[in-house]
Image (cartoon, rainbow, N blue to C red):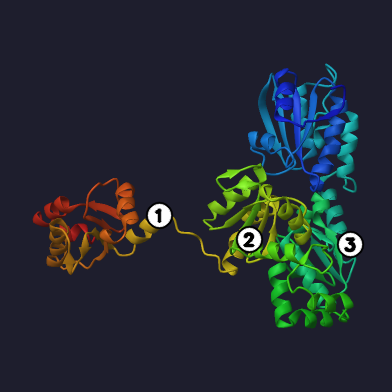
């Protein structure tokens, strides 16, 4: 490649480049992701330092076939090849790890050349070191100095405005639904505030979580004091407490024209009168957004996603056992382009809960990891979908002694069920029961769950005892009551 990065525009082009057998590094990126842009600078510099390796770049959302082939669900993402085979991957913005992995694939820059300083954790040339050092500028030589410098910087940022919001994106172009909500609240309250886009600086983003002991964003500060995130800001706004707290901190509040306009506008968070969309399209988009409590605008369908980012969000929703509706934005270009303007969100997928934009795959993944997604779903009244196995477990555990039978204890509908009911009653054993004739799904599911093909089935404390023959043997041997009371 001679020190350049080649843009790959098809799966066939990539396969041909890799099949040549030369060491190769592939960067999956997205134009909306600042971390991708930062890492691409390091990637481009590595291409110069390792001229014998192939450096390839793929815009992940524009090449769904390639992204899906390498299971890409977040950016930046790197894949490393040698002799035509994948030998390593890297997810996330970590310049030193990228340089190390490239060095392992491509070998030393010059035979016998010493490795880069171990304190930087990478084996790369001087130009790369300089680039990485720029990422870490302002830090001291030791870990203590680095931490101290970061804390000073964070404190300066927090105190830079009387009201300071650390958010994803900017007030004019928010990059998560929660940030949008807090921005709207502050505008409606007529509060002047400063902001910092935590997506633009990973050091600030990660450092502020530890500094504030608050794991998520946005974070709202007043006179240097953390008020909280979206949930707390919303609660304070609804109760009128937000204004009172700010007044106590000596912050003047005056209703602005912008706030007044918002209150008399569409009434929906993040929607303004200046989108430029027709009223018909706006109405259609809002109808689609609200067509289900949980709505996912994605590429493809849940069972056939057409990009790795959409696939990831589908997987997360299924892991959370959430029922959701979806819309394939590839099937309707008017919706695809219009929703970007309507939501002020430039990429897909887009997840909405009760009509409120949550964000894309990176935000949904971060929320799941922190437990915030489950919390938001519960707060919005979205209950987990109970699968059959979960339901069967609950039924089995609903009583210490549980009998799955045909009919009910007062009217058994088979002789074997009647025998077991009588045996339990004669021993004076209290028990719960379920009539498997009332629900075919449970009837078949319990057979599979227990690996026992017939009914009745008797359980004690969630464990299968057996069917009619075993129960009668236990009774005749004088062991039934003891077995069901251990």
Q: Quadrant of residue 48?
A: top right
| Among numbered discs 1 and 2, the one appearing first in the sequence | 2
* Label 3 residue SS: helix
Compared to residue 327, the image places residue 165 above or below, namely below
Mark 3 neighbour density, 10 Å: few (under 14) some (14–19) many (20 or more): few
Q: Quadrant of residue 53?
A: top right
Mark 1 neighbour density, 10 Å: few (under 14) some (14–19) many (20 or more): some
| Among numbered discs 1 and 3, the one appearing first in the sequence | 3
What x and y, as percent, mark residue 228? 73, 69
Can you tell which of label 2 and label 3 is closer to the viewer? 2
Mark 2 neighbour density, 10 Å: few (under 14) some (14–19) many (20 or more): some
Pointer 1: what residue?
A: 388
What x and y, as percent, mark residue 394? 37, 60
> What is the C-alpha distance between the residues marked 2 and 3?
28 Å
Pointer 2: what residue?
A: 372
Q: Is residue 90 visible?
A: yes
* Label 2 residue SS: helix
> What is the C-alpha distance between the residues marked 1 and 2?
26 Å
**On-image quarter of the N terminus:** top right
Q: Residue at x 53, y 58 (%)?
A: 323
Compared to residue 402, the image places residue 311 above or below, namely above
Q: Residue at x 24, y 60 (%)?
A: 403
323 sits to left or right of 263: left
> What is the C-alpha distance between the residues marked 1 and 3?
54 Å
What x and y, as percent, mark residue 248? 82, 82
Q: 64 or 418: which is nearer to us?
A: 64
47 sits to left or right of 362: right
What x and y, as percent, mark residue 284? 69, 63
Q: 254 or 216: which is nearer to us?
A: 254
Pointer 3: what residue?
A: 156
| Among numbered discs 2 and 3, the one appearing first in the sequence | 3
Q: Residue at x 8, y 55 (%)?
A: 476
């Amino acid at each position: 490649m001679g020190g350049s990065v080649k843009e790959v525009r098809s799966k066939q082009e990539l396969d041909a480049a890799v099949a040549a057998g030369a060491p190769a590094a592939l960067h999956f990126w997205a134009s909306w992701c600042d971390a991708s842009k930062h890492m691409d600078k390091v990637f481009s510099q590595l291409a110069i330092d390792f001229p014998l390796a192939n450096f390839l770049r793929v815009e992940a959302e524009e090449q769904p076939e390639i992204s899906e082939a390498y299971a890409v669900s977040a950016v930046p993402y790197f894949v490393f090849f040698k002799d035509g085979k994948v030998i390593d991957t890297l997810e996330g913005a970590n310049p030193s790890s990228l340089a190390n992995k490239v060095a392992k694939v491509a070998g030393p820059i010059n035979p016998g050349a010493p490795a880069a300083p171990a304190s930087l954790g990478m084996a790369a040339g001087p130009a790369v070191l300089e680039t990485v050092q720029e990422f870490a500028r302002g830090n001291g030589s030791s870990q203590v100095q680095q931490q101290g410098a970061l804390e000073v910087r964070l404190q300066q940022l927090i105190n830079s405005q009387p009201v300071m919001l650390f958010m994803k994106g900017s007030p004019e172009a928010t990059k998560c639904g929660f940030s949008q909500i807090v921005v709207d609240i502050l505008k409606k309250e007529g509060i002047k505030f400063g902001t910092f886009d935590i997506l633009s600086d990973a050091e600030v983003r990660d450092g502020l979580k530890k500094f504030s002991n608050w794991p998520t964003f946005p974070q709202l500060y007043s006179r240097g004091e953390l008020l909280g995130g979206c949930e707390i800001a919303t609660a304070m706004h609804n109760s009128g407490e937000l204004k009172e707290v700010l007044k106590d901190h000596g912050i003047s509040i005056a209703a602005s024209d912008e706030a007044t306009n918002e209150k008399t506008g569409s009434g929906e968070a993040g929607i303004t009168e200046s989108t430029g969309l027709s009223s018909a399209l706006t109405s259609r988009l809002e109808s689609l957004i609200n067509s289900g409590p949980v709505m996912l605008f994605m590429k493809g369908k849940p069972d056939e996603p057409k990009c790795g980012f959409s696939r990831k969000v589908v997987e997360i929703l299924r892991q959370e056992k959430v029922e959701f509706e979806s819309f394939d934005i590839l099937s309707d270009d008017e919706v695809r382009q219009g929703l970007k303007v309507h939501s002020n969100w430039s990429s897909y997928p887009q997840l909405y809960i009760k009509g409120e934009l949550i964000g894309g795959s990176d935000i949904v993944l971060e929320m799941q990891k922190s437990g915030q997604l489950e919390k938001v779903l519960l707060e919005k009244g979205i209950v987990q979908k109970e699968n059959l196995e979960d339901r069967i477990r609950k039924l089995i555990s609903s009583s210490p002694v549980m009998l799955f039978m045909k009919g009910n204890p007062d009217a058994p509908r088979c002789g074997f069920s009647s025998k077991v009911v009588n045996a339990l009653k004669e021993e004076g054993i209290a028990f719960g029961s379920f009539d498997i004739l009332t629900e075919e799904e449970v009837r078949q599911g319990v057979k599979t769950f227990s690996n026992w093909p017939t009914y009745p089935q008797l359980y004690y404390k969630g464990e299968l005892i057996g069917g009619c023959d075993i129960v009668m043997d236990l009774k005749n041997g004088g062991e039934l009551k003891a077995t069901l009371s251990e």
